[in-house]
Amino acid sequence: MIGRARGTIARRILLNYRIDPVVAAAHLPPGFTPKLANGYAIGGICLIRLEHVRPLGAPRALGIASENAAHRYAAFRMDRGAGEDCVYIARRHSSSRLNTTLGGRLVPTVHHPAHISVSEDDEVIDLALSAEGEWAARVRVRRAMDLPRSSAFGSLEGASEYFRSAAVGYSPRRDGTRLDALRLETARWEVRPLLVEIAESRYFGDRTLFPEGSIELDCALLMKNVDHEWRFGERASTAAAA
């Protein structure tokens, strides 16, 4: 399998919900607990456009571009006496047939097929995720000056550090018995606040999963034009899926 890849994060939106920690914990695998922000668990959708992605050492011209989505939870994980801030990814989707074909085979992380439509200009970004089952979503955001006053993070700096410190994402393998690990390393880290105009998620809006009063929209953050590297498979064999 490919162990490392690099590329550019052309656009990354983190749509975040604050969730009752007891409710969020029920959606995490054994060994994972919610990473709290002001007493709340944080879950959401990462909507990311990647460009020039290729195996480490390959020419930039051979890289591919794709629109991707990940339904995720900020988490804390203990392993052999050591703890780490991390992300648990319930499901990954990609518009790239290459990603969905090779994911879980040539590269560890499994991606499910989806159509992701995007309309954007300098002020507004409008995305629609069309996927099977409960994973469809629609997000419309606009540039903003700061986070909402109701945000669990308190400040943009606090939100930035909360996500920066959780660099490893864990997601289920194809067989569902274990987790793959993916570490994100960036050349720089900078997030900007967004005003959420539309946030529709079939998954996070499902009241059988998130009872009334257990979940609220918190904020959205934007990253743009960040060179990055992915490291696959680190400590993947130590995590057991739910």
Image (cartoon, helix red, strand yellow):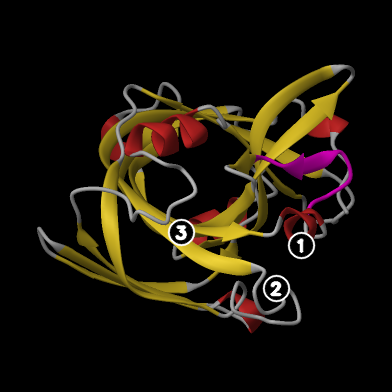
Residue in view at x 82 percent, y 59 percent: 26
Name the residue tied to disc 2. 210
**Residue 30 in the image: x percent, y percent?**
89, 45
Please tell me whether residue 14 is drawn above or below residue 124 in the rendered image: above
State yes or no: discs 3 and 2 in contact (Cβ < 8 Å). Answer: no
* SS at circle 3: strand
Between 10 and 192, the one nearer to me in the picture: 192
**Residue 104 in the image: x percent, y percent?**
69, 49
Residue kind at label 2, given as amino acid type: Phe
Residue in view at x 63 percent, y 50 percent: 40
Give the distance between the C-alpha atoms of the residues marked 2 and 1, in whole angstroms: 7 Å
**Residue 208 in the image: x percent, y percent?**
76, 81
Q: Is residue 216 visible?
A: yes
Q: Main secondary structure of the magenta part?
A: loop
Name the residue tied to disc 1. 23
Left of 162 or right of it: where is 111? Answer: right
Please tell me whether residue 71 is drawn above or below residue 86 in the rendered image: below
**Residue 233 in the image: x percent, y percent?**
69, 31
Give the distance between the C-alpha atoms of the residues marked 1 and 3, in whole angstroms: 16 Å
Residue kind at label 1, given as amino acid type: Val
Give the distance between the C-alpha atoms of the residues marked 3 and 2, in whole angstroms: 15 Å
Left of 73 or right of it: where is 64? Answer: left
State yes or no: discs 1 and 3 in contact (Cβ < 8 Å). Answer: no
Furthest residue in direction top, as rendered? 81
Q: Quadrant of the N terminus?
A: top right
Q: Is residue 12 visible?
A: no
